[in-house]
Amino acid sequence: MEDARLTHSELLKLKRWNTPTIYNGWEVITKHDITQGFNQEETRDFMPQMGPMVGYAVTAQIEPSNPDHPKADPAAWSKYREYVAGVPGPKIVVVQDLDKPRVIGAFWGEVNGNIHRGLGCVGTITDGAIRDIDEMANAGFKAIARRTCVGHAYSTPVRWGVDVEIFGCTIRPGQLIHADKYGFLAIPPEDEARLLEAARYMDDNECNTVIAAATESPASLSSIS
């Protein structure tokens, strides 16, 4: 997937639109099912003031309720961080909490957010919990999650670099993700190259024709259909 990666400039331009606008562009170019590829369940953006985030997925699974994981592989954290560091940025860390629907502990907080920001990650999407919201925001690390939690329990990486399922959507390592307060969209690799052009086209089409016609007084049915 690395060969198909968009340039830094292209990623910055994608950040100028919200995720629904990116979806509008994606649906006109993709051959995939347009009812899939985005969250099917409600997400919560804990840093909406930071706007959209765009990056390539690095993935992990956790099970904070299980005290055996830290004992099973004491080097798990080091191996996981080596994996994250080895992927070019910008990156979004996608974390599947195997405890769901229960929430036992938070993988994300001030320390982990700062560490991942230093590894080139711009934020996270997790169907588990987070804490230290203000501190992560100050570090420039955006978090979209299910809820907050006081403790971290046994939050150790169990598996990483694998397909994960969060909020009813499967995300593969290396997928381009666009996410904001409305949810997230995971782009199939073959659709990346045309995504920016498609988003720009759909945004221009709405501004120059549909919305403009709808705000005319009076608007005609033929002009907005």
Image: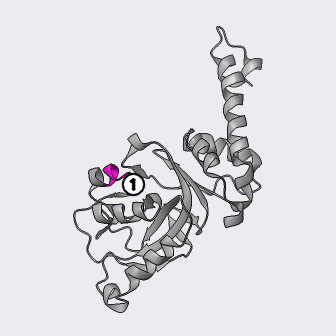
Q: How is the image coloured?
A: one colour
Relative to 196, does residue 95 appear above or below in the rendering? below
- Nearest the eye: 162 or 111: 111
Give percent across and percent down for residue 88: 57, 65
Relative to 176, does residue 172 appear above or below in the rendering? below
User: Was residue 155 drawn as part of the magenta stretch in this picture?
Assistant: no
Give percent across and percent down for residue 9: 62, 46
Q: Residue at x 66, y 41 (%)?
A: 24
Q: Residue at x 32, y 55 (%)?
A: 136
* Position of the C terminus by quadrant: top right
Q: Residues within 10 Å of mark 1 (few under 14, many from 20)?
A: many
Q: Residue furthest top?
A: 217
Residue 1 in view, yes or no: no
The residue indicated by pointer 1 is 141
Q: Residue furthest left?
A: 150
Q: Residue at x 48, y 64 (%)?
A: 94
**Label 1: element kind:** loop
Residue 110 in view, yes or no: yes
Relative to 53, does residue 1 appear above or below in the rendering? below
Q: Is residue 84 left or right of residue 216?
A: left
User: Was residue 139 drawn as part of the magenta stretch in this picture?
Assistant: yes
Q: In the figure, residue 124 lies in which quadrant?
A: bottom left
* Position of the N terminus by quadrant: bottom right
Give percent across and percent down for residue 148: 29, 58
Q: Which residues are magenta?
A: 136-141
Q: Is residue 68 left or right of residue 4?
A: left
Q: How many marks?
A: 1
Disc 1 marks which amino acid? Phe
